[in-house]
Image (cartoon, rainbow, N blue to C red):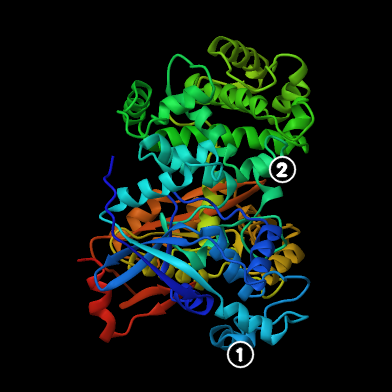
Amino acid sequence: MARVEQDLAVRSESVQRLYGLYIADRFEVNRRYQRKLVWSVEEKQKLVDSMLRDLPLPLFLVAELTTGTDASLELIDGLQRLNAIFAFLENEYPINGKYFDLDALADTKLMKDEGRLEQKEPKLEREASTDFVNYTVALSVYRAADQASIEEVFRRINSGGRRLSRQSLRQAGTVSSLADLVRVLSSEIRGDTSPTDSVPLRRMPQLSISNYDLDYGVVVDEIFWVENGILRREDVRESLDEQLILDLLIDVTIEPTPSSGTRVRDAYYSYGDIDSAESAEAVAIAASIDLKGAGAIKIAFKRAYDAVRTVVRKSDKKFSNLVGAGPGGRNPRYFHITFLAFYELINVDRLRLNDVDKAVKALTKIGGAALNVPGGGGDWTAKSKRATVDAVKGVLRSSFEGPVDGDDLGSFGYASQLEVLLGNARVEQQLFDCKQGLFTLASNDRKFDPGALATIARTLAAMANMGKGAVGYVAVGIADDKKDAERVEELDGVNAIEYRKFLVVGVEREALLAGKPLNDYWHWITQKLAGVGLDPALLSQVLANARLVPYEGRVVLLFKVSALAAPIFFEGQLWERAGSQTVLVQQADYARVFGAFTA
């Protein structure tokens, strides 16, 4: 356990000063241990109301981190409160029906004048708005010896009451391959992923979970768990989705299947006495993850998850209604068994789901038959769980074919990956781009557009120049904007499928235009890409990692690119990404681009 060094300074800071740090990206959020943005608008409004009444707030705790000449403030305590304050300043919600007067603060006035913020009406009185930005809070700055010390502080200050759920505390205080898998898979299924663990607070609203109608973030009712009656809104806010993922990971990683319950979960995290040695269970699951590979476990998990989701969506019902689970909006054990049945059929028995309609019929009202789970919470014995999984597998077996050889277990798992990429693109646009397709939309005379393919090649080269370790994606079959999606519908009769404001139109319509089966169209496009002048090493890598991704009845062509050992030129020029744009690098900046590969 890290020893916590006492190097603490407390200072008073105005809201105005804090907002300046915020827009300068000085506040950082470490998603390895920090909570999601989960406060409801009502909770945010209560905080702002307290400030307008000049009532005191608890102190805000940050860790000062220095990288080179730059210093950032990693948030340890106060994430939800700071987000509430800054969201009010930016007119995202009102207080008592009135919005902050953007002219009362120089920074928000400038952004309003530049069109980056819009003043909503009615406005809060100027005097009240000015008083709000002059409100002072106590900011406690902790100079940490290392990252482990910061995480230890976070866990200790949140373990003295009911501020965090038990699962949140398990996650916050654990550095392990199990905790990483729980965190990553949970975030991917919720849809609040980020490209890196460290995210500027200014970007966190894109990852927020909200019950309010905003242009960003994740709507809580659209999260798979809530949408399907598996967990309730509040359950997700309390990280019970992560607890369910934990239970599933334990069951697919440890043999024979163990029991489920609070004591079992604590044991696999070595949670309880934070000064104790690692538990036997924690050692066992770490060894199992190391043996199987965290990446392989994640792929197998997403295969099963996508298969279940495909069947549920085909049924056009909520999961809870499909299986005939009880009322109340919380049925995690029904999903637990169903997931394990799919997981074992696909990843253990090496079968491939080949009849989705038959699987829908098999799961219909199964809650009153083979899917018989104990109610009332409490421990769930291994024997009871094992018997139910086997019974559900027996009912589903005729929906599958095989065994199959190699990794040909179906296309499941890729849809979730695409959603992760789209979610990440909301936070980091430099390493993601999308195109509606490769055929023109300007006229009814549809033709293949070689310029569009050259643009994709240029974008891939630019992404590869973003520095050592950079990984980027270009998705073909996702409309650039609503106008293109409407044009695709007009010309091709294809309705776009929306995910996080992205509009998926697919490329199978273009295969028809080309007069080719989809797989032939795919090979035709890759052959054309080979002729546009990409660096041979980069081209080989791109083609090796390209794939067709089925998504909700559409098919997306996905190109992946990874940086090489040095920057590469395209058409004799050097390109890079600036936000969502591909821009030409001037010769005076070549040293900067090359420097990103030697640091």
Question: Could you tell me which residue is drawn at 42 percent across and 25 percent down?
Answer: 267
Residue 264 at x, y percent in the picture: 48, 22
| Residue 45 image offset from top left, x and y in percent | 69, 64
Location of residue 213 in the rendering, given as x and y in whole percent from the top left corner: 72, 62
Question: How far across and how far down the image is residue 70, in percent?
Answer: 30, 72
Mark 2 belongs to which amino acid? Glu
Q: Give the residue number, with chain letter if any, for mark 2.
A: 227
State the CA–CA distance, disc 2 to disc 1. 40 Å
Q: Is 328 placed left or right of 346 in the picture?
A: right
Quarter of the image with the N terminus in it:
top left
Which element is circle 1 on?
helix
- When the figure is inspected, residue 251 is found, relative to residue 200, above or below; the finding is above
Is residue 239 placed above or below 72 in the rendered structure? above
Residue in front for this viewpoint, 317 or 484: 317
How packed is label 1: few (under 14 Cα within 10 Å), some, or many (20 or more)?
A: few
Q: Earlier in the sequence, mark 2 or mark 1?
A: 1
Q: Residue at x 69, y 44 (%)?
A: 233
- Residue type for callout 1: Asp
Q: Which quarter of the rendered picture does the C terminus lie within? A: bottom left
Above/below status of 235 relative to 430: above
> Of 343 and 189, which appears nearest the observer?
189
Nearer the observer, disc 2 or disc 1? 1
| Count of numbered badges drawn on the protein | 2
Q: 223 or 464, which is in the foreground?
A: 223
Q: Residue at x 60, y 53 (%)?
A: 38
Pointer 1: what residue? Answer: 113
